[in-house]
Image (cartoon, rainbow, N blue to C red):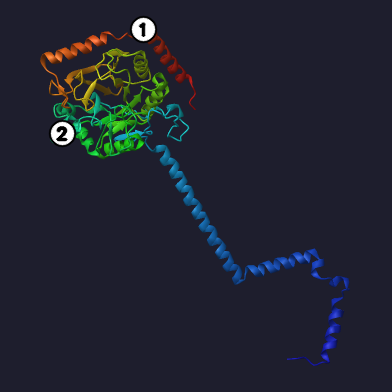
Amino acid sequence: MNQPASNQPSRKHSRHKSSGTSEASRTPSRRNPALQKKNASRRRKMYQKSRYYRQRRKRLLLAGGMGLILLLILLTFAIRSCIDKKSKPTNTQTVQTDGTQNSDTVNSDQKKKTSSDDTEPDPQENSALPAEPVSLTVSVVGDCTLGTDENFDYDTSLNAYYESYGSEYFFRNVKDIFSADDLTIANFEGTLTDSEEREEKQFAFKAPAEFSSILSDGSVEAVTLANNHSHDYGEQGFADTLAALDQEGITHFGYDETAVIEIKGVKIGLVGIYELKDHLERTEQLKQNIAKVKEQGAVITIVIFHWGNEKEEIPDSNQTTLGRLAIDEGADLVCGHHPHVLQGMETYKGKNIVYSLGNFCFGGNSYPSDMDSMIFQQTFTVDKNGVASDNNTNIIPCSISSDYDYNNYQPTPAEGEEADRIMNKIEERSTWITPASTEEIDSSANEENSAESDEDTFDKS
């Protein structure tokens, strides 16, 4: 209700009188810092009591809480990832291959390590040695050309025998031997492909992919592809061969591809080197591949070379140099092939080098001049101290054919006088090998001792 008009003047007068202040004392609050601060504090308190403020604060707290939870989740995943990476074993599969499959035209010096880790793993960390002694028997054979050349007479070819007798025919006479061992290794020399892109060369071998069953039916578990016929039908033929072997469960290795197979809890490293093109320039590839399988936990290392000269009965200096270097680098067994004839063998630093195993199941010639062959076996004993130096070997003299007059592509153990003749040949040719000089052995031994001494004194931290 409005007050009487007569009361308004007296109220205004009374206010001025009671205030007792000048014009200056009624300056707006923005000119008085203390009052301005007080008013700001008051507005802030009022704002904090408002519903809008409470809702906004609630949203901010909720957003902040969600952000904190998300950060904790990310940190948890990051920590677990680091722990898993450090604790993950190098090998978890029975068979592991590493590297790429390259032709002989690729320089191994240009290869990059597949691991992105800058630190070198300690081989001993992965080398799980058995608490109790374990015996492993390995059989190694030479050239297996499971196919034919398109220019050969097809009626007498290996392919024709396959059509007539099936895949089990070829290794029938040696399958019991291969089945009784722990690992059989062969040189697969040819291609399994339907490609028509034949390389320009004198001999080029191929067969359908199904011929890979010859190996599995014959109890052959692993093959090297580092040879001069693995690319007879180019990269496509090589890729088809790998696929066919994989389909049949055959482990393959060679060039920069290595393999580690675990048998009876013991890891065996497989290295295949093609020497024919650049000879001693394969030194660095040899060293790197041996080191690779050892880093992956190989307790036993086997190196297979395709080397030497055709029909030569004595290994050349490239063979002896590389073979002994492989032993120096840690190989436990070295075997070779390509000459198509048997060469001798030697023991170097307590390890065996078999320079040429000759042909074995050989589709490259229906009437070869030399049909002598062999199966080289070595039984390794591994215990908590590593590989024993017992050098337990067995040589089984063979012929590449079960028929004396021609090659029927069925390798067969020799018997009686024939077995004695082949054994005498191997023993005689072994005497033709110039042994490593005492100076060479001492020099390499001193290098090993020096390396061990440097490793002992080097601060790995």
* Comes first in the chain, label 1 or label 2: 2
In the drawing, what numbered circle is on residue 328? none
In the drawing, what numbered circle is on residue 168? 2
Residue drawn 42% across the image and 39% down it: 85
Residue 41 as seen in the image, left or right of residue 17: left
Crowdedness near tag 2: few (<14), some (14–19) or many (≥20) residues, C-alpha within 10 Å = some
Residue drawn 88% across the image and 73% down it: 23
Residue type, mark 2 in image: Glu
Tell me, yes or no, if residue 38 can be seen here: yes
Q: Position of residue 260 (x, y in %)?
A: 32, 31
Q: Quadrant of residue 325?
A: top left
Q: Position of residue 313 (x, y in %)?
A: 27, 13
In this picture, is 27 found above or below 251? below
Q: Position of residue 216 (x, y in %)?
A: 21, 34
Residue 126 as seen in the image, left or right of residue 175: right
Q: Nearer the viewer, mark 1 or mark 2?
A: 2
In space, the residues marked 1 and 2 are separated at their CA atoms by 47 Å
Nearer to us in this view, 268 or 221: 221
Nearer to us in this view, 221 or 319: 319
Residue type, mark 1 in image: Ser
Q: Residue furthest top?
A: 438
Tell me, yes or no, if residue 133 can be seen here: no
Looking at the rendered structure, the secondary structure element under dot 2 is helix
Q: Residue furthest left?
A: 416
In the drawing, what numbered circle is on residue 437? 1
Task: Locate the N terminus and report the quarter of the image it occupies.
Answer: bottom right
Residue drawn 23% across the image and 17% down it: 392
In this picture, is 291 found above or below 437? below
